[in-house]
Image (cartoon, grey):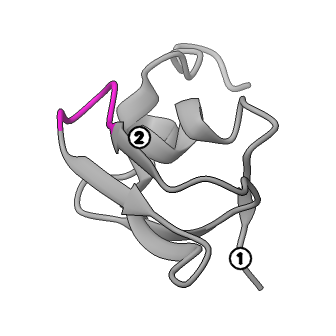
Amino acid sequence: MHFGQKARTSRDEVAPRNSTLMLHYSGHQAVNVRGAATGNFYRFTQHQPVQAVDAKDAVFLLGTQLFRLAR
């Protein structure tokens, strides 16, 4: 870190605005998820386990064992 530079603590700096990540749901039941950061709703099923998720919401979902980054 350079002198006078602020430490990165904001989620917006970790996940830039208007960015999305493709997440893969590994659960066996369909699930509706409301994004903790944006309030957006996402529906994951066994037939559609991969969805585009706002990066700010993905931070929280990736913290669970049910989601991972899609390849």
State the CA–CA distance, disc 1 to disc 2. 15 Å
* Residue 36 - label: none
Q: Is residue 65 left or right of residue 55?
A: right
Q: Amino acid at mark 2?
A: Asp
User: Disc 1 marks which residue?
Assistant: 70
Image quarter hosting the C terminus:
bottom right
Per the picture, the main secondary structure of the magenta-coloured stretch is loop
Q: Is residue 16 left or right of residue 5?
A: left
Along the line of sight, the residue nearer the viewer: 31 or 61: 31
Residue 12 percent coordinates (x, y): 36, 35
In the image, which residues are magenta?
Answer: 34-39
At x 17%, y 33%, the residue is 39
Q: Is residue 36 magenta?
A: yes
- Residue 47 lies, with reference to residue 66, above or below; the image says below
Q: Amino acid at mark 1?
A: Ala
At x 32%, y 55%, the residue is 42
At mark 1, the secondary structure is loop
At mark 2, the secondary structure is helix
Residue 63 percent coordinates (x, y): 71, 30
- Classify mark 1: residues with Cα within 10 Å, few (<14), some (14-19) or many (20+): few
- Residue 66 lies, with reference to residue 10, above or below; the image says below
Q: Is residue 66 left or right of residue 3?
A: right
Residue 30 percent coordinates (x, y): 50, 56
- Residue 30 lies, with reference to residue 24, above or below; the image says above
Q: Earlier in the sequence, mark 1 or mark 2?
A: 2
At x 73%, y 25%, the residue is 1
Residue at the front extreme? 29
User: Could you tell me how many numbered marks the image carries?
Assistant: 2
Residue at the left extreme? 39
* Residue 57 - label: 2
Give the quarter of the image for residue 64: top right
- Residue 31 lies, with reference to residue 43, above or below; the image says above
